Image (cartoon, grey):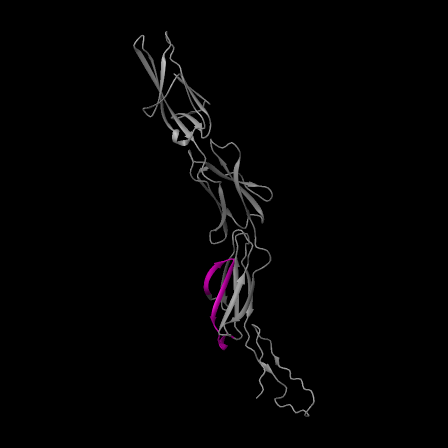
């Protein structure tokens, strides 16, 4: 018979946690006393009634056999046990919150892969703002879909891990956050006024908001981007008076948000085109523009 300390039984035999000290004691009473030999996966590793492994490692998983023999009586007996060494996955659990269901829902994602056996993960709300109960545990990866509009802003969720080799609690947290304020958009001219750049941003959310540009008639322009969206096109007077709308979606907002701008070409306002002054006197010339967007540069020429 083989006794193992610390004593932990599994379906396949015995288990130990990596870096523990494990002692195997073989008992085969006889008179005179038996001699003992230890084998690991059929290779002799020790002699004596007790075999101790200091700081056991995962590579020590396998079959341990104790052979007890009495040379005086010419008898022998043996016993074999299976020892599995449990070890933690590398690093720590990793958490993230992602958009789901076309940015109307939240996907809570947690991962802690590796180790033996696989870690059990489950999502649970934690104060403040968390709602709902604990989910069923899953191995190595855990996901949970939540309705975005029904989740309060700044809700925190915890992914908790359990593992036979875990001595202290392990978890990671995510907090869902609605971006502050409203989307902001503006237009600037670039490369000697050759191009127009429409820029839109709604930053600071978790998960990140989705932004896209649309014309005044609702036609979508360009592609959708998260956090910020920039639309560049060649300058043209045909855009004067045109409206552009940046729309934004976030799972925590039931309605989409937007900001808009209107492009206006510069129009010079003059009361008269000819000014007469006496030689040697001071003169001030003023150039006035109607409302223009984006801002225009004014250059003066003499002849």
Picture quadrant where residue 157 is located: top right
Q: Position of residue 285 (x, y in %)?
A: 64, 84
Work out which residue is located at the far left of the displayed protein and give it: 74
Question: Magenta stretch: residue 238 in it?
Answer: yes
Q: Nearer the viewer, residue 149 or 288?
A: 288
Q: Position of residue 95 (x, y in %)?
A: 50, 44
* Left or right: 70 as drawn, with respect to 147: left
Figure check: 130 above or below 222? above
* Left or right: 44 as drawn, with respect to 195: left
Figure check: 5 above or below 116? above
Work out which residue is located at the far right of the displayed protein and give it: 281
Picture quadrant where residue 127 is located: top right
SS majority, magenta? strand
Q: Position of residue 271 (x, y in %)?
A: 63, 86
Q: Quadrant of the C terminus?
A: bottom right
Q: Quadrant of the N terminus?
A: top left
* Left or right: 156 as drawn, with respect to 7: right
Q: Nearer the viewer, residue 74 or 205?
A: 74
Query: For the magenta stretch, what is the residue range?
Result: 221-239
């Amino acid at each position: 018979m083989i006794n193992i300390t610390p004593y932990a039984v599994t379906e396949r035999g015995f288990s130990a946690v990596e870096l523990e000290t494990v002692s195997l004691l073989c008992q085969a009473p006889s008179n005179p006393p038996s001699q003992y030999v230890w084998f690991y996966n059929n290779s002799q590793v020790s002699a004596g009634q007790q075999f101790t492994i200091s700081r056991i490692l995962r590579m020590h998983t396998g079959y341990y056999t104790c052979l007890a023999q009495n040379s005086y009586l010419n008898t022998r007996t043996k016993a074999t046990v299976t020892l599995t060494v449990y070890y933690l996955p590398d690093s720590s659990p990793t958490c993230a919150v992602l958009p789901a269901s076309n940015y109307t829902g939240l996907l809570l994602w947690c991962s802690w892969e590796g180790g033996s056996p696989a870690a059990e993960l489950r999502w649970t709300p934690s104060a403040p703002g968390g709602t709902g109960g604990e989910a069923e545990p899953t191995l190595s990866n855990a996901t949970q879909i939540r309705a975005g509009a029904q989740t309060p802003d700044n809700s925190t969720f915890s992914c908790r891990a359990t593992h036979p080799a875990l001595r202290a609690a392990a978890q990671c947290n995510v907090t869902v956050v609605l971006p502050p304020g409203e989307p902001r958009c503006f237009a600037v001219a670039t490369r000697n006024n050759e191009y127009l750049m429409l820029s839109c941003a709604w930053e600071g959310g978790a998960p990140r908001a989705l932004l896209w540009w649309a014309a005044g008639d609702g036609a979508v322009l360009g592609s959708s981007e998260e956090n910020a969206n920039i639309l560049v096109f060649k300058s043209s007077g045909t855009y004067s008076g045109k409206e552009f709308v940046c729309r934004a979606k976030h799972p925590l907002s039931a309605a989409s948000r937007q900001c808009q701008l209107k492009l206006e070409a510069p129009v010079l306002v003059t009361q008269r085109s000819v000014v007469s002054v006496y030689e040697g006197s001071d003169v001030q010339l003023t150039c006035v523009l109607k409302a223009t967007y984006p801002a225009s540069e004014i250059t003066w020429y003499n002849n």
